[in-house]
Structure formats: structure tokens, C-alpha cells
Image: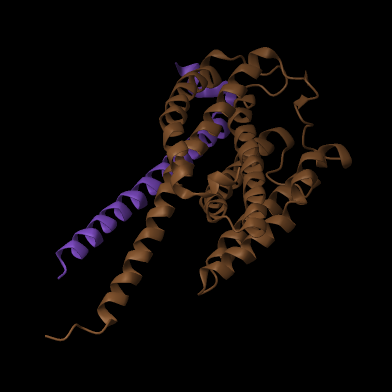
Chain colours: A purple, B brown
Amino acid sequence: MQEFFHMGGYAQWVWPVYGLAAVALVGMLVSTRRTLKSREREFENLKANRKGAP
Amino acid sequence: MHRFANPTQFMRIANAIYPWAAGLCVLLFAAAIPIALVFSPPDYQQGDTVRIMYVHVSSAWLMMMIYGIIAANSAMFLIWRHPMANLMAKASAPMGAIFCALALITGMLWGKPMWGAFWVWDARLTSTLILFFLYLGYIALSDAFEDSERGDKAAAILALVGSVNIPIIHFSVEWWNTLHQPSIIKDGNMSVDPALRLPLFLMMGAFTMFYFAVLILRLRSELLAAKIRNARLSQVADASAPQPAE
């Protein structure tokens, strides 16, 4: 286990790479989904308003 | 080809692809990460830093592929005015920029322990930095005009002009003397040991599927934004229309 985290002495280079990649990918997914959900809500609201209008 | 210009047709296919892309992405990552970090051996020269390669090459592969997709779609948008092609390019650009940044940063974190420097101004690194600026330029231009159609056109032209940079990046390690190691997948003659090739290909597959899955979500989102704009416009039109007499 110790050996795994040690990465043959290159831990300070290997782990930041995997950390950054994880942050970048999760960030892309989360921000895309958040925008999509808020637009879905906005569109539903607009449709509901139009139906409610005289 | 032209029938995919219709957003409804296009999204029907995209939505059918989505669960496969997302599922494959999860499976490939589940296989790639443990093999890349634990079960593959260290390189005989580069030691455990070779594990950086799996992320670095995958990011670099995507930054190239996404730019190719943006350039091809920009051409289709300029020639046939296909709105779907424009949306493909627009939805892809921020992801391409992020993968390009990731390739640059992971390259620096690999360069320091192996070359002794985070950065050298050689052909491969410089042309990749230019690619990053092309991505930023594309994103900035497509938002720069009040009239979004004009901005989209200007951005599409930039994407096409900038595509000369793609072969430059690809061949830079052969045309110029460079610190950067040459391509590892060349004419089917693979210079990488199979034990290192497996995690690399799994990781590249996982990244690629990730791009396709998130791209489909972004396309849905872009189309919704267009619908919202249209609904707003027709609301304004309704409100300013003369009221019927009582």
C-alpha cells in the first residue's frame, strides 16, 4: 500500500496528474448537467406561463 | 449526411447513442484506472512516471480529435449553413480547450522529472500552446458579436484557418529536433510494450466515450437554449401585438 502511494519516488508528479484529470472531467460533467437542468426548468416555466396566459 | 442537419433527426440518433457512450465510458474507466495505477509495470527507463502517459496521451488525443471535429463542422456550417454543425462545434470547443490544457499541464508534470524542465520552447510544445489559444479564440469569437450568427461565422473561419496547426502538431516530432518523444503508435508498428499499451488504449477509449457522452448532453442543452430564446421572442411579440378590441 505504502509502495502504491510512493509511486517509485515519483508520487509528487503522478498523483497531481490523476487528481487534475479527475477534477477536469468531473467539472465538465457537473457544469454541463447543471446548465442542462436549469435550462430544462426554464423552458418548462416558459411553457407553463404561455398556457396560463389568456 | 444532410438529413442529420435536422435537429430532431440528429437528436433522435444522439439520444440513442447516449446510454451506450455513457455506459462504455464507465466500464472503460473502471478497467483503465486500476490497470494504469496498479496492475501495469513501471517503465524500464521512466519508472512510475510512465503512468502519467495514460492521462497525458489521452488528453492530447482528444484535443486533436475535438479540433478536427470542430474544423469539419465549421466547414459544413459555412458551406451548407447547417445549424446542427454549428452547435456541434460550439458545444465541443470548451471541452477541447480543457483537454488541451490538461495535455499541457500533465506534460509539464511529466517533463520536470524526466527532462528537468517544466517547459521547453520546442515545436511540439509550442504548437500545442498555439492550439490552446486557437480554442480560446474560437470560444471568444463565437460570443463576441451581438448578432450570434456573425460571431459563429467568424469563429468557424478561425477554426478552419487554424486547422493547419493540426498536422504541424502531429508531425512536429519528426520535422524538428525535439525533446518530446516520437509518436508511439506509428504505421501499426507499436513501440510501446503491450503491458503499457493496454492501459493506454483503455484510457484513450474511456476519454473518448466521455467526450461523446458529455457532448450529447451539451447539444441537448444548446438546443434548449435556442428554444428558450424563441419562446422569449414570441412572448415579446405577443405582448407588443395590438390587443383585440372589447
Displayed quadrant of residue B151: bottom right
The answer to which of B47 and B157 lies nearer the viewer is: B157
Q: Position of residue B118 (x, y in %)?
A: 67, 44
Asked whether residue A22 is in view, the answer is no
Q: Nearer the viewer, residue B106 or B127?
A: B127
Say if residue B165 shows up in the picture: yes
Number of on-image labels: 0
Q: Quadrant of the N terminus of chain A?
A: top left
Residue occupying the point 71% across, 54% down: B130
Question: In what quadrant of the picture does the C terminus of chain A appear?
Answer: bottom left
Residue A20: x and y in percent read 50, 40
User: In this rendering, would B170 be left or right of B22?
Assistant: right
Please give left or right for residue B18 compared with residue B158 in the image.
left
Query: Where does residue B153 sit, x and y in percent of width and height?
Result: 62, 64
Q: Nearer the viewer, residue B108 or A45?
A: A45
Percent x, y for residue A38? 30, 54
Picture quadrant where residue B157 is located:
bottom right
What residue do we see at 73% from left, 51% from top?
B163
Up-down relation of residue B153 to residue B193 (above or below): below
Residue beneath the point at 83% across and 40% down: B178
Residue at position x 56%, y 27% in the image: B205
In the foreground, B227 or B222: B227
* Farthest residue, direction front: B245
